[in-house]
Image (cartoon, rainbow, N blue to C red):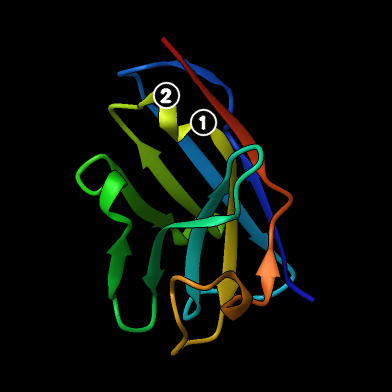
């Protein structure tokens, strides 16, 4: 059984940066689709970004394009979400997820593995 564990969420100032980590264990996710989602209080879980590591295809939600970047350290079996130019509306619990492609990047139910989430709070 594979497991995902996010870390790196914390309180940050608007305009600042954070890097979230998603550590994978229990199996190789090297050729999976890895997605990032977020959920703010009272709102549904929404898509942030995804990369299909078997094809290299990468998709970002419009509001994070140019600010967020997905990367991976294969030696550490860890995926990262670099978040720059943070905005108040980026405040949410962030989740990483994994699923076998091809899949619908934008739909949470497409992903089989999920982490527990990490809280990102952006203050003014």
Q: Which mark is residue 19?
A: none
Residue 56, quarter of the rendered image:
bottom left
Residue 27: percent from left, percent from top: 68, 75
118 versus 22 height, above or below? above
- Rendered-image quadrant of the C terminus: top left
Q: Which residue is mark 1?
A: 91
Q: On the rendered structure, is 99 left or right of 2?
A: left
Above or below, comparing residue 49 to residue 16 in the picture:
below
Q: Residues within 10 Å of mark 1 (few under 14, many from 20)?
A: many
Position of residue 57 measured from the top left corner of the image (x, y, whole percent) = 28, 75
In the picture as drawn, the residue positioned furthest to the bottom comes out as 102
Tag 1 secondary structure: loop
Looking at the picture, how far across and down is residue 22, in whole percent?
58, 51
Q: Quadrant of the N terminus?
A: bottom right
Residue at the image point whose x is 37% and y is 36% from the top:
83
**Marks 1 and 2 close (CB-CB < 8 Å):** yes
Residue at 59%, 64% in the rendered image: 97
**Residue that label 2 marks:** 88
* Crowd band around label 2 with a 10 angstrom C-alpha radius: few (<14), some (14–19), many (20+): some
Residue in the foreground of this view, choosing between 8 and 118: 118
């Amino acid at each position: 059984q594979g497991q995902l564990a996010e870390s790196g969420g914390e309180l940050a100032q608007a305009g600042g940066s954070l890097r979230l980590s998603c550590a994978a264990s229990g199996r190789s996710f090297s050729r999976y689709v890895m997605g990032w989602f977020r959920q703010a209080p009272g709102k549904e879980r929404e898509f942030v970004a995804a990369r299909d590591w078997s094809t290299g295809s990468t998709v970002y939600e419009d509001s994070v394009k140019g600010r967020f970047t997905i990367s991976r350290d294969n030696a550490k079996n860890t995926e990262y979400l670099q978040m720059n130019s943070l905005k108040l509306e980026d405040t949410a619990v962030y989740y990483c997820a994994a699923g076998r492609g091809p899949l619908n990047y934008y739909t949470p139910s497409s992903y089989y593995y999920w982490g527990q989430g990490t809280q990102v709070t952006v203050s003014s």
